[in-house]
Amino acid sequence: MKESGMNRRDFFGTAKGLAAIGGIGLLADGQRVKGANERVRVAICGLHGRGKDHLHNFSQIHNAEIAAICDIDESVIRARLADFSRMGLPKPKTYADVRLLLEDKSIDAISIATPNHWHSLMAIWACQAGKDVYVEKPCSHNLWEGKQLVKAAERYNRVVQHGTQTRSSTSVREAIQKIKDGMIGETYMARGICYKWRDTIGRAPVEAVPAGVNYDLWTGPAPLHAFTKNRFHYNWHWFWAYGNGDLGNQGIHQVDVARWGMGLTFPTKASAIGGHFMFDDDQETPNSLNCAFEFDPPGRKRRMITFEVRHWIANHEAEIGTRYLGTPEKVSPPGQPRLGPLAGAHNSIGDIFYGSNGYLSTGDEDADTYAAWIGRDQSPTKPVSGGSERDHFQNFIDCVISRNRANLNAPVEEGHISCAMVHLANASYRLGRTIHFNPETQEAIGDEEANKLLGNIDRDYRKPYTVPENI
């Protein structure tokens, strides 16, 4: 079935027993949060995995208060309430249905850490309800949803931060500025890598839905499928109905950094090949994928970004993953190089930028520094604090208070462009051909099958969990 438009009144009518809430989505700037000394009341949605990190970060921000939590699994709610007790935090309100949560006028913002297929819908509903939004990456499950979320943020004048927290990393921000200042000359290509030690998920049989789980709410806009453990906590990433593979899971961070450093927007061409190699299991998404994107920016030379996902044994490249990118004074044990982020698990996560005078490499948001090579000589690099991902959450809270969307480190408009690259590459892989793309219309050129995968036509949502068409 094709989705139908849903306005605010339609949305709030879908949850049983909801009261009318008036024009909350049209409140003037600053009305909900009146000053810098006030605390932003945040509700965290989705608490099993990444949501625990949201809880940890928001709990340490002085001008934020976790006022509510929302999850479809009663056991997860109980576990998080125990965390609140151990941390000495006030007990928050609890919800299973986000629609009931959004009725609460005392909530200023929601933080979304649900499976991907809920990201855009929940964020759009929140914008319509007058809430600001921190939405995990990727902000959309398909490209069209991202377009709709960008429209909602603008229409309802909401602060919407994308969860690509590397944009708040001190070291990566410094590296990107060095690139823009011409440190490696004219950049012509960037390469992102995502080598993560991913084991097989095996095969899981159909079984009864666990007690205390609202599986209808968990499924939301996706097609309803018989319950299996592999389609539930975390492993949902590897099924097309809910996730976007590791390209949209970890890879979106490095895709975003590559595009950011190159100063590019949408690509004009995308191509990807790969497969699900080695393991015979339930996973649908590829565990090895090579992607290439071509850009034709107005008034500039053509540019290229490549990206690679590897799921198993892989070598490190440009020192990414072997140590903190060239900081020999930081060694443990003495005389041995300090291992970089997640290197103990044989992971390499980062970006390499190629220019006319050299190249520069960055790690993930935890890397202490970056490394650059100019000509034949390695240029000196100094240790800089990588910062912490809490900086990204703090940046969001600061912008909620100031109402200055321009100060967001990762505004949803930028997140949407990077997510579009993920969706284009996945569509190319699934169709087995290159996709030509029109950046102005954000549509595949002359390719109906690609536009269906991108969500631009023939959208199919399970009512009432429908991403609104008219925003």
Image (cartoon, rainbow, N blue to C red):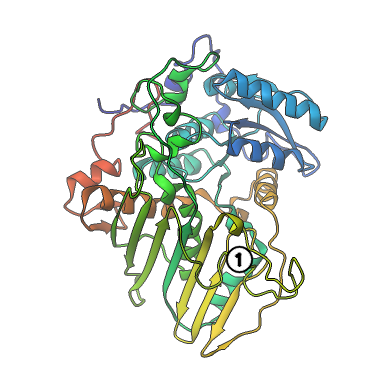
Q: Tell me what residue is drawn at x 43 percent, y 15 percent.
A: 208
Q: Is residue 123 above or below residue 216?
A: below
Image coords of residue 357 (percent x, y): 48, 87
Q: Is residue 447 above or below residue 4?
A: below
Left or right of residue 356: residue 331: right
Quarter residue 169 falls in: bottom right
Q: Tell me what residue is drawn at x 36 percent, y 39 percent.
A: 283
From this viewpoint, which residue is outermost toward the top?
Answer: 17
Image coords of residue 31 (percent x, y): 68, 35
Quarter residue 400 falls in: top right
Image coords of residue 177 (percent x, y): 59, 72
Image quarter hosting the N terminus: top left
From this viewpoint, which residue is outermost toward the right?
Answer: 88
Residue 419 showing in the rendered view = yes
Q: Nearer the viewer, residue 38 or 74?
A: 74
Q: Nearer the viewer, residue 10 or 335?
A: 335
Left or right of residue 305: residue 333: right
Q: Nearer the viewer, residue 304 or 19?
A: 304
Residue where numbered disc 1 is placed: 172
Residue 106 showing in the rendered view = no
